[in-house]
Amino acid sequence: MTKVIFTILTYQTRVQPKKFVRVVILADMSKYFYKDIKLIKKCRRCKVEYRPKRYSFFAALSLCYKCRRLYYDEWYQKRYKPFLERLTPSERKEHDQKQYHAWLVWTRKHVDRRRKLALESYHRNKNKHREQKRIADKKRRAKVQAG
Ligand SMILES: [Zn+2]
């Protein structure tokens, strides 16, 4: 029989000694012993609890899902955009090629996710030029009838 123990406790982290982090420890006391530690962290902006993976980038960032969006926007405006503006045209071209290569690698690695993104993009943009297309078709039909 397996026995699962749930415990919630707070402990001091080694990285940030003054901060306490709540964790959930799941332990299976059978012959297949494992201990799964799940973090519960508080967002440093809005103090909402969120559960990142242990040792992940999101655990180190200590921002919740909503605040992460703002953080990325700020990072893009204050760090990445000035960096791009500083580059010379040849450097920029090299940078773009590297980015494109990284994107190609990502698409090869995550085919299903890429397909999902592409489908979402298709449905988002399919009606964008509907009105212009309708007007163009009308003009073409009028031309055919006249000529
Ligand atoms: Zn937050």
Image (cartoon, rainbow, N blue to C red):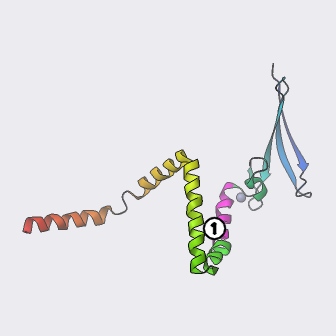
State ligand 1's quadrant: bottom right
**Relative to residue 87, is residue 112 drawn left or right?**
left
Residue occupying the point 56% across, 79% down: 89
Badge 1: residue crowd in 10 Å (few <14, some 14–19, many ≥20): few
**Relative to residue 6, is residue 98 drawn left or right?**
left
In the rendering, at what x and y percent does residue 103 appear? 57, 58
In the rendering, at what x and y percent does residue 12 appear? 91, 51
Q: Relative to 64, does residue 144 appear above or below in the rendering?
A: below
Which of 140/99 is in front? Answer: 99
* The magenta stretch spans residue 69: yes
Magenta: main secondary structure equals helix
In the rendering, at what x and y percent does residue 53 appear? 75, 47
**Relative to residue 35, is residue 90 drawn left or right?**
left
* The magenta stretch spans residue 84: no
Q: Quadrant for residue 143, please give it.
A: bottom left
Q: Relative to 34, does residue 138 appear above or below in the rendering?
A: below
Residue occupying the point 65% across, 76% down: 83
- Magenta highlight range: 65-76
Which quadrant is home to the N terminus? top right
Which of 44/90 is in front? Answer: 90
Q: Relative to 59, does residue 33 appear above or below in the rendering?
A: above
The amino acid type of the residue labelled 1 equals Asp
The residue under label 1 is 73
Q: Quadrant for residue 28, please give it.
A: top right
**Relative to residue 38, is residue 119 drawn left or right?**
left
Residue occupying the point 58% across, 78% down: 90
In the rendering, at what x and y percent does residue 37 appear? 81, 40
Q: How many marks?
A: 1
Q: Secondary structure at mark 1?
A: helix
Residue occupying the point 64% across, 70% down: 76
